[in-house]
Image: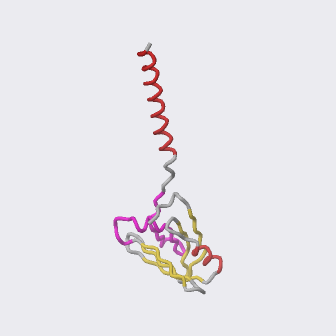
Amino acid sequence: MFKYIAGKMGITSVVCVGLLFSASAAMSGTKTNHPVEIDLTQSPPLVTGSFGSARNTADGRQLIRINDRGNSIRVVARDAAGNQLACITNNSQDMAALRVMSDSSFVRYFVDNNTCKNVIVRNGSQYSPK
């Protein structure tokens, strides 16, 4: 009788351990990498990337920098190839979007004659923190 109970407990233990590992894998969450990309083939050029991905790259070149001057915001981005674009915006919607950026943010915008346009900021747990 003892062997029979031990056998059932062994199966139960294996099932519980299996459920524990599958639950922890499911709870680990989505992670995405968004290095700085500057698409000069677009007209106007398109810039995308996230703070965390830029900070965590091995190349040591990538960056996204935001300088809030109150009535305008200057954004500088540099990709792995060394391409760098800077722009300024005083558009209230674009400034509001840039002001909510955190270390877990993704940004996308166009640079048209040194002006940042159509700024989109996404905040989420999937973006690597710096």
Q: Is residue 95 left or right of residue 39?
A: right
Residue 7 in the image, given as x and y percentages of width and height? 43, 19
Residue at 60 percent of width and 73 percent of height: 97
Q: Was residue 26 drawn as part of the magenta stretch in this picture? A: no
Residue at 57 percent of width and 65 percent of height: 122
Residue 128 in the image, given as x and y percentages of width and height? 47, 61
Say how the picture is coloured: secondary structure
- Residue 22: tell me if it is visible: yes
Total marks in image: 0
Residue at 56 percent of width and 72 percent of height: 109
Question: Does 125 sit above or below residue 28?
Answer: below
Residue 43 in the image, given as x and y percentages of width and height? 54, 74
Magenta stretch, residue numbers: 32-61
Q: Nearer the viewer, residue 76 or 10?
A: 10
Q: Residue furthest left?
A: 59
Q: Quadrant of the C terminus?
A: bottom left
Question: Does 30 sit above or below residue 71?
Answer: above
Q: Residue furthest right?
A: 93
- Residue 49: tell me if it is visible: no
Residue at 48 percent of width and 73 percent of height: 40
Q: Quadrant of the N terminus?
A: top left
Residue 11 in the image, given as x and y percentages of width and height? 45, 24
Question: Does 30 sit above or below residue 75?
Answer: above
Q: Nearer the viewer, residue 41 or 22?
A: 22
Question: Does 61 sit above or below residue 21?
Answer: below
Q: Residue furthest top?
A: 1
Residue 116 figure quarter: bottom right
